[in-house]
Image (spheres, rainbow, N blue to C red):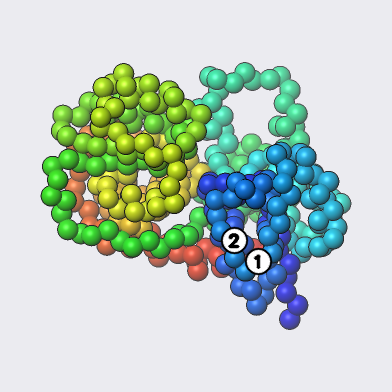
Amino acid sequence: MKKKKILFILPTLTAGGAERVISFVAQNIDRNKYDSKLLVTGYKKDAAYTIENIDLKFLEKSRVLNAVPQIFLYLLRHKPDVVVSSIGHLNTVMGLMSPFFPKTKFIIREASVISSMNQVHSESTKKESFSLHEYLSHKSYGLIDKIICQSNDMAQDFVNIFNVPEDKIHIINNPITNLAPIKSTKANNSEVVNFITVGRLSKEKGHLRVINLLSKLNFDFHYTIIGDGPYKDEIFNIIKAKSLKNKVTYIPFTKEVSKYMGLNDLFLQGSYVEGFPNTVLESCIVGTPVLAFNVPGGTKEIISHNENGYLAETEEEFLFYLNNRKELLPERIRSSVESKFNKEKIVKQYEALFN
C-alpha cells in the first residue's frame, strides 16, 4: 500500500512544548504507513531536540514570514497528503496557503487558550482598533481542514473566537515523550521541603504569586526554578525583595529536567492559563506531586485532586496545600497519568486523524 505523505512544519526546534510534541509525533507515527518529514523555518543551531530516522530540513530564516516562498516551493515539490503545523503565525500562513494546494489536507495545532492568554496580557498591550494578524487568522482558520486542540477548554475557546464548526476540532492531549525513571519512595531525611517550578519565565506562568505565597511559609524550604524568559528580572527582583535569595536555585536550561523533578517534594505551578502543560505531566511521571491553580487549560485534565497532586481555586487554598501536604505515593502518581497519556495511545489518535 502506498504510504501517506505527512509533512510537519514548525517555526523552530527550540525547547518548547509545541516543538517537543510535534517533533515527537513526526518521529513516532507508523513508518510502514506514513512517509514523515519535518520542515523547520528557523535555524539548525537553535535546535534543542534530536531528530532521527526522518527527513529534516531547516530553512534558516529568522521569521516565518521570510520563509513563506520556500515553504510554498517545498509543498509544490513534495506534494504532501497532509500538512501539520503548530504555533500562531505559522498556522495563519498555512491556512492562507491551503487554497493553492487543493489535494493536500491542512491541520493546525493550537497551543493555548487564546482568550484567557489575552486577558493575562491585556494590561501590558494596547488593544488596536484593527489587528491585521487577527483579521488574517479568522480568514485563515476558516480554510483549514482540521484543528487539533490539546484540552477541552482550548477547543471550546477556539470555537467561540473563530466561529469554526465543531466537527473541525479534534481534542488530542500531549503524549508522555520521556518515560523517565520513577523517584525513590524512600522518605527524604532532610527537614527542608523542596519545591520546583519548570517553565518559561513569562507573565502567564504566575511565578510572582508563587514566590509571594512561599514568602509566607513558616518552615524551612528550598525552591528551584528552571527556565528562562522575559520576566526573569522581575521575578528575581521580587525574590530579593522578599529576602528569599538564599532559598532559591536558578537553572536557565537543562536537559535533565526529570532528574531535578525527582529530587523535589512538590512541583508548583502558578499559571493563570495553560495549554496542556508538559512539565506537569513530566512531574507526575517521575512521581512528584503537583500543586497548581485550577485555571483554563489542560492542567485539570492531568491533575486528580489528592491523587497525584492538588488543584487550588484561590491563593488561600494554594497556601493551605503548601502547609498541609499529604504523603502521595510516587507509583500511584505515575500510574494516574501513564495509561491516559502514553505515547502509543496519543500517536494512534494522530494517525486516526491523518486517515
Judging depth in this view, the residue of 70 and 306 nearest the camera is 70
Badge 1 crowding class, 10 Å Cα cut-off, few under 14, some 14 to 19, many 20 or more, is some
Badge 1 is on which residue? 54
Q: Where is residue 348 in the image (x, y as percent from the top left)?
A: 56, 68
Q: What residue type is labelled 1?
A: Ile
The residue lying at 36 percent from left, 36 percent from top is 250
Mark 2 and mark 1 residues within 8 Å of each other at the beta carbon:
yes
Whether residue 55 is visible here, answered yes or no, is yes
Judged from the image, the secondary structure of the residue bearing numbered disc 1 is: loop
Q: Where is residue 149 in the image (x, y as percent from the top left)?
A: 58, 50
Q: Where is residue 257 in the image (x, y as percent from the top left)?
A: 39, 50
Number of numbered markers: 2
Q: Is residue 76 left or right of residue 325?
A: right
Badge 2 is on which residue? 51
The residue lying at 59 percent from left, 50 percent from top is 47
Looking at the image, residue 207 lies above or below residue 107: above
Judging depth in this view, the residue of 304 and 32 nearest the camera is 32
The residue lying at 15 percent from left, 54 percent from top is 187
